[in-house]
Amino acid sequence: MTRLMAAEIFKLRTTRTFYGLVGGALALVLVIVILASATAGANDISLRDVISIAGFAQVFALLLGIIAMTSEFRHGTITPSLLVVPDRVRLTLAKLGASVSAGLVLGIVATGLAALIGALILGARDIETGLAGSQVTKMVIGGIVACGLYAALGVGVGALVRNQVGAIVGSLVYLFVLENLLTIAKPLRDPVAKYGFGGVGNGLTGTGDPGADHPPLDQVPAGILLAAYCAIFLIAGIALLKKRDITA
């Protein structure tokens, strides 16, 4: 299994898409962090707000997981892969391990740099960070774990949908459009804000506003709930993958 996961990591890091996604995620996070920290008014920004910008990396981790699972179907390499590893569950778990590893590394770099650069710029501007060192540590750890779990979620979505464009577009539309639209309905507003992917992500990273009308879950419950979402998608995706005919 270790060699199989190493092979999947090798597949990921030898594609231009991987470096494009990672580079794009880091560039986006760093540019926004620097601009926000350097230009926002003292009363308009805190270190919590700056670290929350690293949440963009979670979306890129999700895309990494989707691409890791769907690229073989898109490029027709799934058949030779299954000839080498006939067990579809083992192959999916290897892709899961590779994707989670990549997501964790992305989370370490993106969240760590956001916290470090934000603290340095805010400190240089004599703006209070509003956070203790232990709180910053929890946020960074939460951001790292969130990226890893979002990568796992991407593998589950990819196993369910298989079509790469459909999986990516569908995921982005739900995260950025549909979930926000659901909060318009009053009966759904509170549960979606708290238990939806956005709310759970904010709870896990600790970047949600505790004083908001719909405060996020605490970090541990949010992490458990996000892990449960990942498990549901992965189990459903693996079950469907085992039943489907593979042609390429």
Image: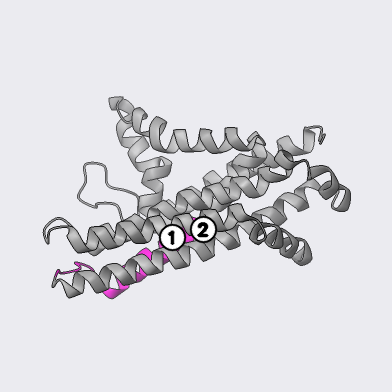
**Separation (CA) of disc 2 from disc 1:** 6 Å
- What crowding class fits label 2: few (fewer than 14 Cα within 10 Å), some (14-19), or many (20 or more)? many
- Residue situated in front as seen by the camera: 219 or 106: 106
Tell me if 149 is positioned left or right of 99 in this view: left
**What is the quadrant of the C terminus in the image?**
top right
Tell me if 103 is positioned left or right of 87 in this view: left
Quarter of the image where one finds residue 37: bottom left
Residue at (29%, 27%) from the top-left corner?
184
Residue at (73%, 45%) from the top-left corner?
72
Q: Is residue 101 magenta?
A: no
Residue at (26%, 74%) from the top-left corner?
120
Mark number, residue 26? 1
- Residue 104 placement (x, y as % from top left): 53, 63
Residue at (57%, 51%) from the top-left corner?
64
- Residue situated in front as seen by the camera: 32 or 216: 32
Q: Element type at marker 2?
A: helix
- Residue 53 placement (x, y as % from top left): 33, 55
Say which residue label 2 marks: 22
- Residue 209 placement (x, y as % from top left): 24, 51
Q: Which amino acid does label 2 sit on?
A: Val
- What crowding class fits label 1: few (fewer than 14 Cα within 10 Å), some (14-19), or many (20 or more)? many
Quarter of the image where one finds residue 73: top right
Q: Element type at marker 1?
A: helix
The residues colored magenta run 127-149
Asked if residue 37 can be seen in this view, the reply is: yes
Asked if residue 206 can be seen in this view, the reply is: no
Discs 2, 1 touching: Cβ within 8 Å: yes
Q: Which amino acid does label 1 sit on?
A: Leu
Q: Does the magenta stretch include residue 146?
A: yes
Tell me if 80 is positioned left or right of 54 in this view: right
- Residue 204 placement (x, y as % from top left): 40, 55
- Residue situated in front as seen by the camera: 218 or 116: 116
